[in-house]
Image: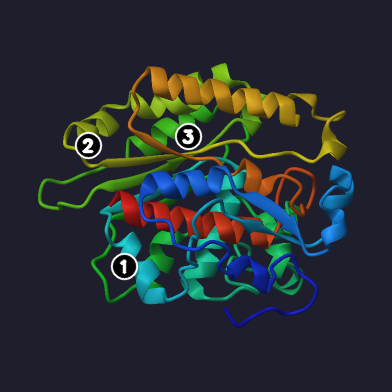
Amino acid sequence: MDQLPGDWSVTTNDYLPYNTRQCGNLEELTSAIKNGERVWLNDSLQDAPDMVKAVESSYFKPANCDIPYIQERSDICGILAKYSSVALLGDSLTRHLTQALMIQMTDDYVAGGTVVKTSAAQLHCKCDGLFSENAMCRGRNAIDLYDLFHEVCSDVQPLSRFDFMGASADGHPRRRVKAHADRIVCPDDDTRPVLIQLQGGLHVKSSAKRTISEIIQPLLENPKFKKCQEKGKVRLIWHAGSAQSRVLDKKYPHQSRENYLEFNKKIDEYLTENQVNVTILDWWKLSENAQMSDGVHYLQDVNVMKSNHFLTVASMLA
């Protein structure tokens, strides 16, 4: 990565090796993500209060093994092309993951994740500003990943579908999940599996019960999903809940760290008890006390690391 302009959450430390070896399999990889730690450039901040840490530069150190950064466009395209279709289903946290994936695909860390084409957005929504929840920067969840993939990855086997689904404004995510699940196709003449990333909770008051009934079950019980699953052609990733800033605990107590850790535990228990074939990406340690735009949403360093982890997992799952 060549671009490190100005004072920004991304540092060269984000891309350095910290362990004696690279993660060799999916179990090692997900453990390295789940059990990693955030390290501050200023050593004196390691034991500082959380709200002090959260405004200072830091980086993520994976546990026990390293996760190489996938920079070459040919490698990124090759990973995505292992699937017949890719769907990223969630809310604003998934939108930011999607924008970070766009950054990696275009190798443009200044404006590669732009989703609003107005002159004002192009002027102000750059670098960390790409992940602002200001209406000027976020638009209306209109992200055309399909066209971007076929523009950037024109020399690999095409995808039949590359979708992002954002949260619905009506507070009924079941409808959006069903609409996208109805579009799942795994044709017999294409041996590649489908890749689905699922995430949610913020728009259902961080209720594990509602997340299961309104987001997870509508996908798992969808006939098209089940048909592809029977063919062994589904690769499912659950994007677990992340750490909110302590600043917002009084305003959004249901999203407090304690409540979200319990949320993650209940979702994990449901997936395990129901023997759902899913890979859980637990980015709690990646996000805890990282720099944020508003106390809920993270800046470019966290999101680009999420994108890189997502691609690495996708490569192993295929």
Whether the residues at callouts 1 and 3 have beta carbons within 8 Å, the answer is no
Does residue 221 lie above or below 23 as drawn?
above
Crowdedness near tag 2: few (<14), some (14–19) or many (≥20) residues, C-alpha within 10 Å: some
Of labels 1 and 2, the one closer to you: 1
Q: Are marks 1 and 2 in contact (CB under 8 Å)?
A: no
**Which badge, 1 or 2, is on the more N-terminal residue?**
1
Relative placement, left or right, of 190 versus 225 is: left
The residue mark sitting in front, 1 or 3, is: 1
Which element carries disc 1, helix, strand or loop? helix
| Kind of element beneath mark 3 | helix
Q: Which one is earlier in the sequence, the residue at label 2 or at label 3?
A: 3
Which of pointers 2 and 3 indicates the residue nearer the eye?
2
Circle 1 residue: 78
Residue 289 x %, y %: 76, 47
What is the x, y in percent for residue 206? 65, 26
Distance between mark 1 and mark 3 Cα atoms:
29 Å
- Amino acid of disc 3: Arg
Residue that lies at the very extreme toward the front in this rendered image: 20
Q: Amino acid at mark 2?
A: Cys
| Figure check: 295 above or below 100 | above
User: Which quadrant holds residue 242?
Assistant: top right
Percent across and percent down for residue 298 are 70, 52
Residue at 73% x, 51% y: name it.
Answer: 133
The amino acid at mark 1 is Gly
Can residue 75 be seen here? The reply is yes
